[in-house]
Image (tube, rainbow, N blue to C red):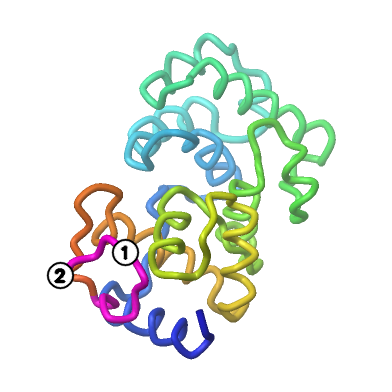
C-alpha cells in the first residue's frame, strides 16, 4: 500500500460517510473509560443500553470504587462476561481513585496497567478522551485493513504498525472511526457489499465482487 493510494481511500471514505463520531455514548472521561472496558466482546449498542443506569447509580470513579459488585453485575449483565467486567471496572475505579488521585492517566503504558484495559482500549481512551493520536485496532479495523491491502496479518499489533506507518498521524483518530464505519456498513464480515463500495477499485480483497 502506497501513501497516495491510502490517501485516496480515506478521501473516498470521508466522502461516503463524513467524519463519523464514536458509537459509544459518554459524557466524561470516567464514562468513556468504563464504557470502553464494558465494550469488550459485545456491541456498542449493548453497552449504551446499560451505561445510563450504571452511571446514574455510580456517577464517578469514587462511587464505583465502593460499589457492591453484585449490584454492578446485575446492571451490566446483558453485555456478556458480566462477572469479569464488573470485577474489572470496580477494581479499575479503585486503582484510579487510590493510585492516580481520581484522574485518568494520559499514558498508554499506565492505562494498560488498569484492570480490563489492553492496548486497543488504551488507544481508544487516548484518542477519544485526550485527543492524542492513536489507531485502535478492533475486529472491524483488522478485517478492513487486511481486505483493503494495508497488511496481511491477524496480529493487531502488526496491523496497527502497518496502518500508522502509512496513514499520517493527523488521520489516525478519524481513520480509526472511518475503518469501523466502513466495516459496519459496507465491508461486513459476512456478505460484504462490494458492488456498493466507494473504494472497490482500490481494494485488494480477493473475494470482492464488482
Distance between the alpha carbons at the discs numbered 2 and 1: 14 Å
Q: Main secondary structure of the magenta part?
A: loop
* Most foreground residue, 109 or 52: 109
User: In x, y percent, where is residue 47?
Assistant: 40, 36
If you read the primary sequence from the N terminus, does the residue marked by circle 2 or circle 1 appear first?
A: 2
- Check disc 2 and report its element: helix, strand or loop: helix
**Side of 44 where 15 appears, left or right:** left
Specify the quadrant that holds the C terminus: bottom left
The residue positioned 73% from the left and 45% from the top of the image is 111
The residue positioned 37% from the left and 84% from the top of the image is 11
Task: Identify residue for label 1.
Answer: 206
- Against 131, residue 180 (above or below) is above
**Side of 3 where 76 appears, left or right:** left
User: In x, y percent, where is residue 59?
Assistant: 55, 34
* Numbered-mark total: 2
- Boundaries of the magenta span: 198-210
User: In x, y percent, where is residue 12?
Assistant: 32, 82
Amino acid at each position: 500500500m502506497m501513501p497516495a493510494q491510502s490517501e485516496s481511500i480515506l478521501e473516498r471514505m470521508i466522502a461516503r460517510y463524513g467524519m463519523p463520531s464514536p458509537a459509544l455514548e459518554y459524557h466524561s472521561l470516567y464514562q468513556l473509560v468504563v464504557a470502553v472496558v464494558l465494550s469488550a466482546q459485545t456491541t456498542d449498542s449493548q453497552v449504551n443500553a446499560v451505561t445510563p443506569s450504571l452511571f446514574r447509580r455510580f456517577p464517578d470513579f469514587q462511587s464505583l470504587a465502593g460499589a457492591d459488585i453484585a449490584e454492578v453485575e446485575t446492571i451490566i449483565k446483558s453485555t456478556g462476561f458480566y462477572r469479569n467486567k464488573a470485577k474489572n471496572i470496580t477494581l479499575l475505579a479503585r486503582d484510579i481513585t487510590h493510585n492516580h488521585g481520581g484522574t485518568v492517566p494520559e499514558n498508554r503504558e499506565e492505562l494498560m496497567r488498569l484492570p480490563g484495559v489492553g492496548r486497543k482500549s488504551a488507544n481508544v481512551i487516548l484518542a477519544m478522551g485526550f485527543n492524542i493520536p492513536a489507531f485502535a485496532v478492533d475486529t472491524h479495523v483488522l478485517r478492513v485493513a487486511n481486505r483493503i491491502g494495508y497488511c496481511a496479518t491477524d496480529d493487531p499489533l502488526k496491523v496497527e504498525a502497518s496502518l500508522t506507518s502509512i496513514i499520517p498521524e493527523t488521520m489516525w483518530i478519524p481513520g480509526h472511526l472511518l475503518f469501523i464505519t466502513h466495516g459496519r456498513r459496507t465491508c461486513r464480515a459476512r456478505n460484504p457489499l462490494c458492488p456498493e463500495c466507494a473504494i472497490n477499485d482500490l481494494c485488494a480483497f480477493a473475494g470482492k465482487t464488482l
